[in-house]
Amino acid sequence: MKAVNLYDYLSNNDYPGRGIAVSRTPCGRKMRIAYFIMGRSENSRNRVFVTDGEGIRTQAYDPSRMKDPSLIIYAPVRVLNGTQIVTNGDQTDTINDFMKEGKSFEDALRTRTFEPDGPNWTPRISAVVKGADYSMSILKSADGNENSTQRYFFDYNDALPGCGHIIHTYKENGSPIPSFEGEPVLFEQEKVPFDEWSDKVWAALNADNKVSLFTRSIDLETGETVTKIYNKNEEK
């Protein structure tokens, strides 16, 4: 698979939905994570990311306008003993709970399915990052058939410097919205400072539909992390 330019890849899709990107810097010393959310409805757009311990959670920007919090208020990021858990829903807590009991990422997600939001049946995407190893997953309907769940898992051990993968909920905009297809997309992690990388990812997301972005840099030797949060609502 040929590596794509991450910024071009994102800017050429006006609605990839929610997405997770994980990469290793060209020097090999750090890992990077990005998680973004987008929205088409007023309810989906009425959100911000806020810190929650070592992780983050979503919350209503204007609580008086929140209509249904069931699928949009959750903790996208948690950290368990140095393992970064990143998902697009409350399966973050499922993974966290299973791993606390010594069970696996896969064990946890085999108890879950796609979101109950027909006719879109939004996939659940997840990732765990431990050191230079990471795993990704997508749980989706069988081409829009709600009676069958397809679970895919992808492992990347000792990630290659200068490379990363991105997975997102939707292939593109539509009605109903088509689910992401295939394996996570390989992208080139260019040699730029973390702040610049984060800014460029945020700028690449569609200006009308983007809502929030979380990015994190993790030093593989020290475990030190640096985190950035972007919220469109707070830029107004």
Image (tube, helix red, strand yellow):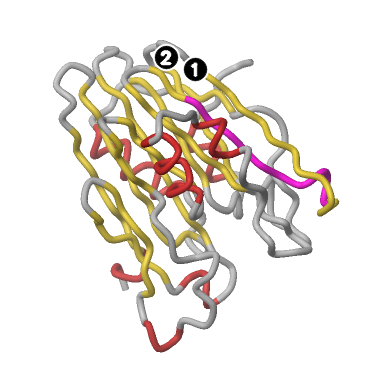
Residue 82 locus on image (x, y percent): 26, 30
Q: Residue at x 74, y 59 (%)?
A: 120
Q: Element under label 2?
A: loop
Dominant secondary structure, magenta: strand
Residue 178: x and y, percent? 75, 51
The residue identified by callout 1 is 156
Q: Left or right of 207: which side holds 100?
A: left
Percent coordinates x, y for residue 5 in the rendering = 50, 29
The answer for how far apart the CA atoms under marks 2 and 1 are is 6 Å
**Crowdedness of circle 2 by 10 Å Cα count: few (<14), some, many (20+)?**
many
Local crowd at mark 1 within 10 Å, few (<14), some, or many (≥20)? Answer: some
Amino acid identity at mark 2: Ala
The structure residue drawn at horizontal position 78% and vertical position 63%, both measured from the top left corner, is 119
Q: Which residue is mark 2?
A: 159
Direction from residue 130 to residue 224 in the image, left or right: left
Q: How many marks?
A: 2
> Residue 108's quadrant in the figure?
top right
Residues marked 2 and 1 touching at CB (< 8 Å) = yes
Report the amino acid beneath label 1.
Tyr
Q: In the picture, which quadrant includes the N terminus? A: top right
| Residue 7 sits inside the magenta stretch | no
- Whether 139 is among the magenta residues is yes
Q: Is residue 119 above or below residue 16?
A: below
Name the quarter where the C terminus is drawn. Answer: bottom left
Left or right? Give the position of 68 relative to 48.
right
Residue name at image x 23 percent, y 19 percent: 220
Q: Name the residue furthest front.
A: 101
Please report the bounds of the magenta region as a residue range: 135-144
Relative to 35, residue 67 above or below: below
Percent across and percent down for residue 105 are 50, 32
Residue at 49% across, 17% down = 156
